[in-house]
Image (cartoon, rainbow, N blue to C red):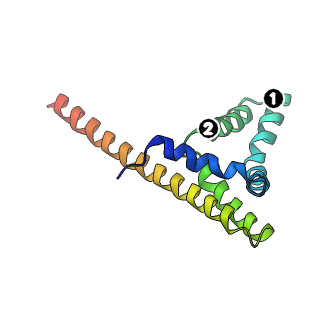
Amino acid sequence: MKKESGSKIKTYLRPFLSWKFLVSFGAAWIITNGWAYVVLFIGTKLGIGWMIAVGGGYLSMLWLPISPEKIITIPMAIWIHTKMFKNDDKTRALLIEMYGQAQEDFKALKLKLKRNKKKVEVRDNGKQS
């Protein structure tokens, strides 16, 4: 059974209502994504194109539904949250649900890409004959 996109949005937005989540996620986000800002800043100041491309490219992926931010940062936020707020099971459960949703989205995208690749291969093989 497919989840509706509205429920996905609710899953991703609910934890943001908790200040404890914001602290945990913010710390994890700085750790996992801060390097891209540093690389982008240095590349911009020194005019180094590859640094701008790497930093900016990584940061541009953060808004994708299956971005590295959700795949890497959320487990780190869960860990940080567990260490900082030992008795807050409600927010930890929301974080785990959010991570599960990101994993489902990632698996669905991989399956869709695999199907599309097979369709392209079949179509290309038919044209070559």
Q: CA distance from mark 1 to mark 2?
A: 22 Å
Task: Using the image as rendered, state which of residue 29 and residue 6 is in the foreground.
Answer: 6
Eye-nearest disc, 1 or 2: 2
Image location of residue 124, percent across then percent down: 24, 32
Splitting the image into 4 quarters, where does residue 86 fall?
Answer: bottom right
Name the secondary structure under disc 2. helix
Q: Residue at x 56, y 50 (%)?
A: 11
Query: How dense is the environment of label 1, judged by Cα within 10 Å: few (below 14), some, or many (20 and up)?
Result: some
As drawn, 35 above or below 95: above
Estimate how packed mark 2 is, as few (under 14), some (14 to 19) or many (20 or more) residues with alpha carbons within 10 Å.
few
Mark 1 belongs to which amino acid?
Answer: Thr
The disc label shown at residue 120, or none: none
Label placed on residue 44: 1
Give residue 63's mark.
2
Q: Quadrant of the C terminus?
A: top left
Instruction: Name the residue located 35 percent from the left edge and 46 percent from the top edge.
Output: 114
Give the residue furthest to the bottom: 86
x and y, in percent, of residue 9 in the image: 55, 43
* Left or right for 116, reference 35: left
Nearest the eye: 20 or 41: 20
Secondary structure of the residue carrying tag 1 is helix
Residue 49 versus residue 83 in the image, above or below: above
Which residue appears farthest toward the left when viewing the image? 129
- Asked if residue 56 lies left or right of residue 105, the reply is right
- Write the residue at 58% across / 45% down: 67
| Residue type marked 2 | Trp
